[in-house]
Image (tube, rainbow, N blue to C red):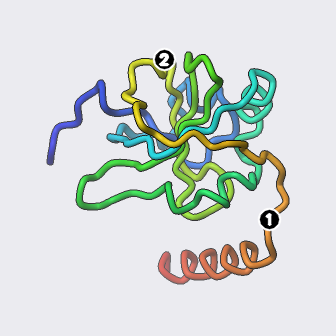
């Protein structure tokens, strides 16, 4: 198994509830390499609300689902960095096609990540308003997961 460089990796948590889960390395967390694909800049107030409700559904995650994935070839989480304009701390999200943070990692100092040339989302829509097709696709995924688990 390939060693993971601690500077290029983070402790990801599956289906976190809030920032406490990320900071305390909640049960089921794992260290993994990452690549930031896009940056969602929020106000401090928005980031505080988002980080306290990581279980929620968010339109900006749905709209940018193509930027979040796990590439088995390089074994890194490709994610969106949710932070503020100062880039001090943030949360890396890999939604795995869902509209909620399926996997997330706390980043205490985003200045340590090379963000040069990364797309900054013009506006991150934090609303839970998702198209009906999302709910149909999510139901199919859920059924497939239950079937594969047997």
Provide the residue designation for mark 1.
130
In depth, the one of 39 and 129 nearer the eye is: 39
Q: Which secondary structure, mark 2?
A: loop
Within-10-Å neighbours for mark 1: few <14, some 14–19, many 20+: some
Q: Is residue 29 above or below residue 62?
A: above
Percent x, y for residue 19? 65, 29
In depth, the one of 18 and 50 nearer the eye is: 50
Within-10-Å neighbours for mark 2: few <14, some 14–19, many 20+: few
Q: Is residue 2 above or below residue 137?
A: above
Q: Residue, x 61% and y 28% (percent of image)? A: 83
Q: Are marks 2 and 1 in contact (CB under 8 Å)?
A: no
Q: Which mark is residue 109?
A: 2
Q: Residue, x 75% and y 32% (percent of image)? A: 52
Percent x, y for residue 30? 40, 40
Q: Which secondary structure, mark 1?
A: loop
47 lies left or right of 77: right
Percent x, y for residue 129? 85, 60
In depth, the one of 92 and 15 nearer the eye is: 92
């Amino acid at each position: 198994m390939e060693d993971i460089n601690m500077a290029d990796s983070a402790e990801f948590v599956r289906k976190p509830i809030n920032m406490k889960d990320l900071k305390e390395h909640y049960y089921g967390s794992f260290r993994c390499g990452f690549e930031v694909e896009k940056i969602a800049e929020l106000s401090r107030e928005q980031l505080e609300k988002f980080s306290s409700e990581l279980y929620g559904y968010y339109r900006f995650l749905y709209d940018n689902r193509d930027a979040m994935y796990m590439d088995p070839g390089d074994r890194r989480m490709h994610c969106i960095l949710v932070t503020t304009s100062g880039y001090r701390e943030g949360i890396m999200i890999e939604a795995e096609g869902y509209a909620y943070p399926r996997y997330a990692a706390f980043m205490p100092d985003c200045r340590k990540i090379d963000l040069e040339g990364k797309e900054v989302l013009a506006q991150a829509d934090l609303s839970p308003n998702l198209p009906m097709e999302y709910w149909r696709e999510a139901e199919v995924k859920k059924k497939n997961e239950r079937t594969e688990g047997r």
